[in-house]
Amino acid sequence: MIEPNKKNLLIGVISDTHIPSRAATIPQEIIDDFKERNIDYVFHLGDFTTLDAYNQLLNIFGKEKIIGISGNMDSREINKILPESREFELLGHKIFLTHGGGGPRGIIRRLNKAFDLSPYEIIIFGHIHQPMNKKEQGKYYFNPGTPTDKRFTDINSYAFLKLSKDNIKFEIIRI
């Protein structure tokens, strides 16, 4: 990942799209919003399910803007090309991406048990299908929810991560 020479970044964040079992494609409303806001990156936190959703994002936004990880429901094709987690730094913020596992209750504890999250300021994950925006013990835990599936949640959503050197903001968008 190459950090652009910018003072502010806007990142579109989605997860658990489950294409094609829950929807034929990533909802156009999300694509349009990402384009309209001129996002710098798209983070997809796993459960694309098939390569089609990943390729949809690549074709629209380009490979340099798509940062994806694999989830527990992803095909072998996805698992071959995307890691289970990623770590990097943007504008001085150390970020960790993973899909996650288990239900929503205790998810932060499970993430901290599964990974050494001590170096990271921002942890972004999927899997639970419920949006989350929490700060615990100096760390931000974010989940965009799912835009296409009503299992385990009563809302559909996606999110934006707004970063500057001195500011972190996670905005959840309900569909």
Image: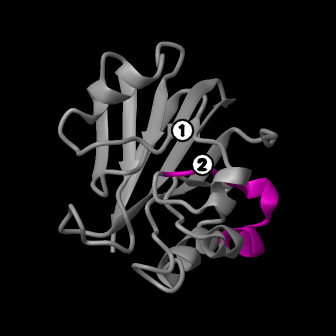
| Amino acid type assigned to the residue bearing label 1 in the image | Leu
Residue at image x 37%, y 64%?
Answer: 146
Question: In screen coordinates, is 18 left or right of 81?
Answer: left
Between marks 2 and 1, how big is the CA–CA gap? 8 Å
The residue range painted magenta reads 57-71
The vertical placement of 131 against 18, above or below, is: above
Q: Quadrant of the C terminus?
A: bottom left
Closer-to-camera residue (98/78): 78
Q: Which of marks 2 and 1 is nearer the N terminus?
A: 2
Q: Is residue 61 magenta?
A: yes
In the rendered view, tell whether residue 83 sits above or below residue 46. above
Q: Quadrant of residue 39?
A: bottom right
Can you tell which quarter of the image residue 83 is in? top right
The residue lying at 44 percent from left, 83 percent from top is 23
Residue 3: say if magenta.
Answer: no
Q: Vertically, is 112 above or below 128? A: above
Residue where numbered disc 2 is placed: 69
Q: Nearer the viewer, residue 31 or 58?
A: 58
Q: Which structural element holds mark 2? A: loop
Q: Residue at x 71, y 52 (%)?
A: 80
Mark 1, residues whose alpha carbon is within 10 Å: few (<14), some, or many (≥20)? Answer: many
Task: Please identify the quadrant where the N terminus is shown.
Answer: top right
Q: Are marks 2 and 1 in contact (CB under 8 Å)?
A: yes
The image shows residue 89 at horizontal and vertical percentages of: 66, 28
Q: Is residue 43 left or right of residue 142?
A: right
